[in-house]
Amino acid sequence: MIIRGPGPILLLLLFTVCTAVLAQETFSFVYLQRAADPFYAPHRSYTGLTLRDRHRPLDGARTAEREGRVLGRVVGLRFKLERRSLEAGDDPTAAVEALHQDAETKVFLLDLPLTDIESLRPLLSRRDLIFFNIRHPDERLRGSDCAAGLFHTLPSNTMLMDGLAQFLSGKGWRKVLLLVGEEKSDRLLADAFIRSAQKFRLRVVGQRDFVLSNDPRQRDQNNVALLTSGKEYDVVFVADSVGEFGRYVPYNVREPRPVIGSEGLSAGAWHWTWERHGAPQLNQRFDRIAKRRMRAMDYAAWAALRSVIEAVVRTKSTDITTLRAYMTSSDFTFDAYKGVPTNFRPWDLQMRQPILLHTENAVIGRAPIEGFLHEKNNLDTLGTDQRESGCRM
C-alpha cells in the first residue's frame, strides 16, 4: 500500500496555521514624544515664509516596522510600533516605567527635548531596556553624559563636521571663514567644525558673529558683504539653525567662494537624492507611508527600529541583555543603504555610518572621503574615536 503525504493545499494550510500561532508573540517598540514640542513649531520669517519646517520622524520607524513583517515571520514574532505622547507636566521616567511594566515594552525611540532625556538618566543604563536617541547630535550625549543603554542612530555634530572637513581637505580648500548665529545650536555646530578643522589641518582664518536684525546700527553684523571682508579664505562656513540669515550668504560673499555648513554644501545622515546602494527603494518605501521625502531624523528612526529587528532575527532572541551584547559586538552589522556595513561603536553606542555631503538637490560626496584611513575601521575617521572618547559607561 502506498501512503501518500499531505497534498500541497493541506501543506499550505498547515504552514499558515503554524505561522499564525508563532506570530502571536509580539515584540513592541514605543516612539515617545512630547506634545506641543517647540522643536516642531514652524519657524517663520518676518514676511511669513516658513524657513524651517520640521516633521516628526515617526514615519521612518513605521517604514522599518513594515519591512520587519516578513523578517518577523522567520522567528515567529510580530513587531509592533506604538506612539505615546507626553503631555505638559508628565514625567518621562514614570511613563517609561509604566509602559515597561504594563505592556512589557523594552525598546524606546526617544523624540524628546534634551531636558526630558536628561531626566531619564536613572533608566538609561538599565540592562533590561534599550533606548535610541534619534534627534540630538549633541556630543555630550555620546561623551560625558553617555549611558550604557542609550544608542545613537543620528550622527553627532562631530561626525557631520568631520565629513565636511575631509571634503575640504581633499579639495585643498584649507582656509575657512566662519559666520556664526546667536542660537545655542549654532555655537555647538561652529565649535564642532573648529575641532574638525584642527583634526584635518584646516585653518580658521576668522569667526564673525551675525545677528538677525534690520537695525542700521548693527549693519556690520547683518551685512554679508561686510562680514566676509578683510580676510583671505577658500570657503565660508555658516552655522545658522534658524535659516533666516544663512539663505542670503551664497552669492553675497565678498569673494567668489563656496558656502558650506547650514547652507550650500551640508552634511547629513540622509538625503532624498541619494541614488546608490538600494537607497531609491528605501526612499520609495518611505514616501508611500509619509507622502514626503525622507530626511535625516526619519532615517535615524528607521535605522533604530531596523537594527533591533535584525538583531532579534539573527539571535532568535527577545532577551534585551542578549540583544544589547550582540548589537555592540563585532559580529553585528546591518545594511544601512550607504554602501558599507553599519554597526554600533561599543565605547559610546554611536552608529557608525557614512556621511552624505549634499546641496539642496544633489549628493556631492560621501565621507569618509577616499584617502582618509583608520587602523581598524575607516568609518571611525568620522566622529570621536575610542581613545578620544569621554564616555565612561
Image (cartoon, helix red, strand yellow):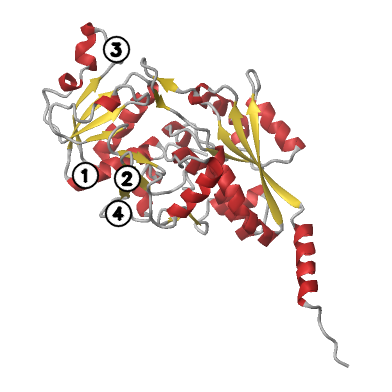
**Residue 281 place in picture, x, y as percent:** 47, 54
Q: Within 10 angstroms of label 4, few (less than 14), some, or many (20 or more) residues?
A: few
Distance from disc 4 to disc 1, alpha carbons, whole Å, reads 14 Å
Left or right relative to 378: residue 201? left
* Residue drawn at point x = 64 percent, y = 49 percent: 321
Residue annotated with mark 1:
169
For the residue pair 355 and 318, the one nearer the viewer reads as 355
Residue annotated with mark 2:
362
Is residue 292 visible in the rendered image? The answer is: yes
Q: Within 10 angstroms of label 3, few (less than 14), some, or many (20 or more) residues?
A: few
Q: Is mark 4 on a helix, strand or loop?
A: loop
Q: Is mark 2 on a helix, strand or loop?
A: loop
**Residue 378 place in picture, x, y as percent:** 35, 53
The disc label shown at residue 373, or none: 4
Q: Which of marks 3 and 2 is in front?
A: 2
What residue type is disc 3 on?
Answer: Ser
